[in-house]
Amino acid sequence: MVDGAPRRRILCISFSDITADARVLRQLDVLTGLGDVTTVGYGDAPAGVHEHLSVDPGLASLPQTLGGVALLAARRFDTVELRAPALRAAAELLAGRSFDVVIANEARAMALAHRVARGAPVLADMHEWAPEERSHVTSWRLLVRPFMYHQCRKYLPLMSTVTTVNQAIGELYRDRFATPCRIVRNAGPFHDIAPSPPAEGRIRLVHSGGAVPGRNIEALIEAVRGLDERYTLDLYLVPGRDGGRYLAKLRDLIGGDPRIALRDPVRPHELVPVLNGYDVGIYSLPPLTPNHRLMLPNKIFDFVQARLAVVFNSAPETDRLITGHGFGTIAPDHTAAAMRDTLAALTPEQVAGYKQAAHRAAAVLNSAEDAAVTRAAVAELLGDSAQPVSRSEPPSSV
C-alpha cells in the first residue's frame, strides 16, 4: 500500500461466532494488516477489525424455513440460495456498501459474497469439503447436500482464489469442480513454551473442541472409564447451539467419576497455555463423511503447540503428521475400546518422549506458513503481488 493512499476495504463473511472461531481469527490477523476489515457474522466484534456487523445468532445460515425447505426439496437452488435467514439479515446490513476484496468463509457464504462484491475479487475459504459437511444426517444428505454441490458448481468458477484445509480435500475440489486450491491449514501461532513436567503417578489426558453430537466425545469418556486410576480426563468444550442438551448428556455419562471433568471453555488465544498443563491430547472421530475421513483439525496443532503427546484415531492426514514427527501414537479405529487399549499401552517414558517430539515439531507446525499463503493471496487480489506465495502441495516440514 502506498503511503497516504486510502486503506483497502476488506469484507470477511463467516456465519460463525467469529470470536470463538480459531480459523477465522487467524485469517483476520492477516487481513487487518492489509486494510480496514469489516466482519459479518454471529456474536461480538473480533479484536482489531474496523467494523463488525452482527447477525442474530438465532438465525440459520441455511434455508431451514418452511419455504426454504420446500424450495430445497424442489431443487430450486438458484431461488433459495439467498433465502437463509442469516444471509438475508447480512445482505440487509451490507446494502449500499462496497469493498476492494471479499472473503467468503465456507460454501454457504459464496452466493452472498458474490452478490455484495459487485465485481470485486472474492476469496473463498472453503475450510473443508463442503458438499458432504453433514451427510451423515439424513435430512442434510437429502436436502442440503445437492444444494451444496450446486453452489460449488455455480460459484467456485467465479471465485478469484480458493483455499482449503489440506491437500487431500484440495484434490477433491480439483477433481470434482476443476478448482485448484491453495492450502491453509488450521495451525495456530507458535508458542514459546516448554513441555510441562509429569505428575507423579498420573497421565493427564485432555480434549478440547465443540460440544456437538457426532464428535465421538462419548467414546473418549468410555475409554477413560475403562482405564486405571493413573488416568484423568479434562474436557474443554464450547457449547453447541442446542441449548446445552448435548453437554447435559455428557454430564450424565460422566456421572460421578472423579477422574473425568467438564471444564469451562476458554478463548482460542488462551487455549494453548491451558492445555500445556496436561500430558496427552486425545481425539477420535468416526469416518462418517469425507471430512471426517480426511480430517486435519486445529486441535492437533493446538496439542503440538501445548507440547503434548497426542493419541488420535487413524486418518491419513493426521497419521502423516504423527508418524512424521513422532509426537504420539495412533488408535487403530474410532471406538472407545481402541482408544482405551492405545492409552493403556502408554508408559510415562513414552509420554515424556512424545512431549519432547511435540516441542521440536512446534517450530514448524504453526501458522506462520499458512499466514503467508493467505497474505499473498489477498495481496494479489488487492493488486500488490510483490511476494506471491502459492501452496498447492503439503508443507515440506514433515
Image (tube, grey):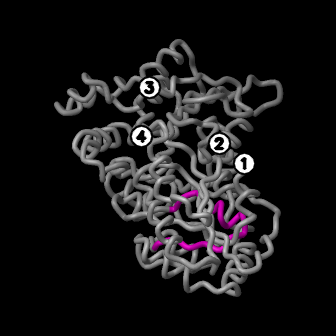
Name the amino acid type tagged 2.
Leu
The image quadrant where one finds the N terminus is: top right
Label 2: which secondary element: helix
Which residue is denoted by mark 2 in the rendering?
25
Which residue is denoted by mark 1 in the rendering?
269
Gap in angstroms between the C-alphas marked 4 and 2: 18 Å
Eye-nearest disc, 3 or 2: 3
- The percent coordinates of residue 109 (x first, y second) are 45, 34
Task: Choose the circle earlier in sequence order: 1 or 4.
Answer: 4
Residue 170 appears in the figure: no
- 2 left or right of 298 in image: right
Name the amino acid type tagged 3.
Leu
Which residue is denoted by mark 4 in the rendering?
107
Eye-nearest disc, 4 or 3: 3
Residue at figure coordinates x 55%, y 30% from the top left: 42
Name the amino acid type tagged 1.
His
Gap in angstroms between the C-alphas marked 4 and 3: 17 Å
- The percent coordinates of residue 81 (x first, y second) are 33, 28
Q: Would you call the spot at circle 1 few (<14 residues within 10 Å), some (14-19), or many (20 or more)?
A: few
Q: Would you call the spot at circle 4 few (<14 residues within 10 Å), some (14-19), or many (20 or more)?
A: many
Q: Kindly indicate whether the residue at mark 1 contacts the one at mark 2 (C-beta within 8 angstroms).
A: yes
Task: Choose the circle earlier in sequence order: 2 or 1.
Answer: 2
Task: Choose the circle earlier in sequence order: 1 or 3.
Answer: 3
Name the amino acid type tagged 4.
Ala
The magenta segment: 296-313
Q: Nearer the viewer, residue 223 or 52?
A: 223
Label 4: which secondary element: helix
Q: Which mark is residue 231?
A: none
